[in-house]
Amino acid sequence: MARDAQRLLVSGRVQGVGFRWWLTGEAVALGLAGWVRNLGDGRVEALAIGEASALDRLAAICESGPPGARVDAVERIAADDDGSRGFEQKPTRI
């Protein structure tokens, strides 16, 4: 069964505030697969895979983020399913 996938690029004060940990928990609760990582430019990048409605919900809650975060923008980009199972945190990409 084909799964929808999208890449999220979240900008603002999103590093050093537990954003990756928080996003991982939210994605797992929504039944999504994929990963999240910090980018060298200060953004957080995530690949989320699953049902379209769950992807929409994840993008919507990313607009607020966890306590301590300040989200300026959430960019959604269509992506390919990379076969991820579960949701994990990846190392920072410089």
Image: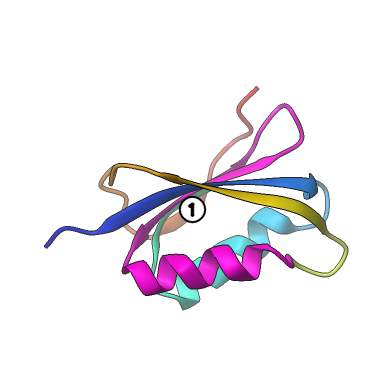
- Left or right of residue 3: residue 13: right
Q: Quadrant of the N terminus?
A: bottom left
Q: Which sits in the foreground, 52 or 15?
A: 52
Residue 41: within the magenta?
yes
Name the residue rendered at 34%, 67% in the picture: 52
x and y percentages locating residue 59 in the rendered image:
55, 63
x and y percentages locating residue 89 in the rendered image:
55, 49
Name the residue rendered at 29%, 57% in the picture: 4
Compared to 78, does 86 lie above or below?
below
- Left or right of residue 20: residue 90: left
Q: Which sits in the foreground, 1 or 59?
A: 59
x and y percentages locating residue 3 in the rendered image:
23, 59
Colour theme: rainbow
Total numbered badges shown on the rendered structure: 1
**Rendered image quadrant of residue 22:** bottom right
User: Which residue is under mark 1?
Assistant: 88
Q: Quadrant of the C terminus?
A: top right
Q: Which residues are magenta?
A: 37-65
The amino acid pointed to by label 1 is Glu
